[in-house]
Image: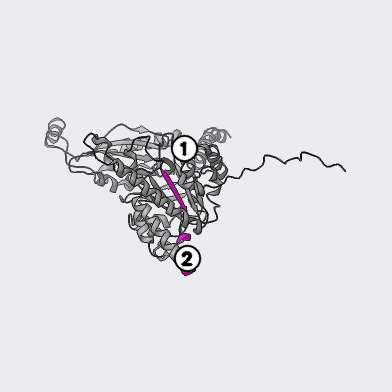
Amino acid sequence: MNDMLTLMEVGGPVVAIGGGAAYLRARHPAAYWSTLGLPISTARLLGSYGSVMEACGLTVAPSRLRAWAVQATTRREVRPVPPRRGLLRPTSTGMRIRLKLAPGQEPADIAASAERLRHAWGVHGVYVSEIKPGVVELRLIGFDVLHKVRMPRRTGGGFLKIPVALREDATAFVRDYRAIPHQLTLGATLSGKSMFLRHLVAGLAPQPVALVGIDCKRGVELAPFAPRLSALATDPAEAAQLLPVLVQMMEDRYDLIRARQGIAPSTPDEEITSDIWGLPYAERPVPVVAFVDEVAELFLTATKKDEERRDEMVTHLIRIAQLGRAAGIYLEVCGQRFGAELGKGATMLRAQLTGRVCHRVNDESSAKMALGDIAPEAVGAACSIAPERPGLAVAGDTSGGWSRIRTPYLSLSTAATICAETALLVPDVPALNRFRPTARISPSGPSDPLVKPRP
């Protein structure tokens, strides 16, 4: 009996602590990492750093001076040395550590062993980034940050910089229109593509930017944001009228830039520019962001007349994609399906779209169309996205880099409220006035007649 009581007194707290730790790890991974995961991983890293680096082939022979000092003082065998380790800096999602590379090493050597380091130190992921020549930073992630997205406090947002999603290394994915002017975003139904677009509109609404929408689904995606839109086309016929206006606006801005480039002897060098951002603030036209939803609808035709209209619209889109950056006109092309079989001009349009975001798609060819030409290894990652994780996507650019991202949830009513509250910020663009949608205001309650009828 006494043994049973002793077992219960000792084993009860152990079972409770173990069960609580398992519950925290499954339900609240961030709390588990802050309480238990971080100390355990830190001790594991510090205790096995040298042996793990040697097992991964990341050690080099020591210098002659160091080898002589070791033999003269300790008379031990001279062993290869790992990269010099800096201080551990814990974060809410993992920890960071800087390594000074040994002579003969490069950042690619550390990146090639990232998966081995992840298993050796028992963390969810290890990501390598170069700080400066000879110094790299290891970002260790303690748990799956994409399971429940929580955006970091510092996202790096600003003018035309919209933090729209979270990367798998716990950093914010920022849509920077100045750096990546045009982007292609693909995703099947219920994949999170609309949520991605919703974040972009809500993030741009408080900024001095003209928003233009082309939504060929009768406006069901962009109509809730009508109070903040400067123009909206809800079918291919209206899009065929709106796109030439954007092209003409682009040409007028180029005329303005060219007039400013009339170089005179008294013109300072810093005033000579090749885009609108070099113009004086008083003369600078407002930037325009055009959202094209369901781009495949612009390519589909049924009659010969539709083919002529399709060719004209595609030509205008390609011209904007080629020349719109300097004029401050940016494209955000979205769709469920995008491939060469859409017709003439599809591949040429894709080549001008620098940014690529691919959510879950229904066929591999769409993923190849989005990512195959810039990061072939990312196609498999895009095709393996599960339907149970909406908002998960693979983002890449023409530099060859890619990463997994996930968009946090944003309700349609919240995004529509942001657009309604910022309706006064709609810039005055006379060329787009005839395309501006009329915002419908719903009555707050039942209206009573002024004169009540008598029986």
Q: Residues within 10 Å of mark 1 (few under 14, many from 20)?
A: many
Q: Nearer the viewer, mark 2 or mark 1?
A: 2
Residue drawn 43% across the image and 40% down it: 163
What residue does disc 2 label?
306
297 part of magenta stretch: yes
Q: Nearer the viewer, residue 47 or 355?
A: 355
Q: Position of residue 378 (x, y in %)?
A: 36, 54
**Distance Cα–Cα, label 2 vs label 1:** 54 Å
The location of residue 50, given as percent across then percent down, is 26, 39
Q: Is the N terminus in the top left, top right, bottom left or bottom right quadrant?
A: top right
Any part of residue 190 in sight: yes
The quarter holding residue 341 reads bottom left
Q: Which residues are magenta?
A: 285-305
Q: Can you give x and y, in whole percent of width and height, for residue 224 in the image?
A: 56, 46
Q: Quick one: label 2, few (<14), some, or many (20+) residues within 10 Å?
A: some
The residue at which mark 1 appears reads as 30
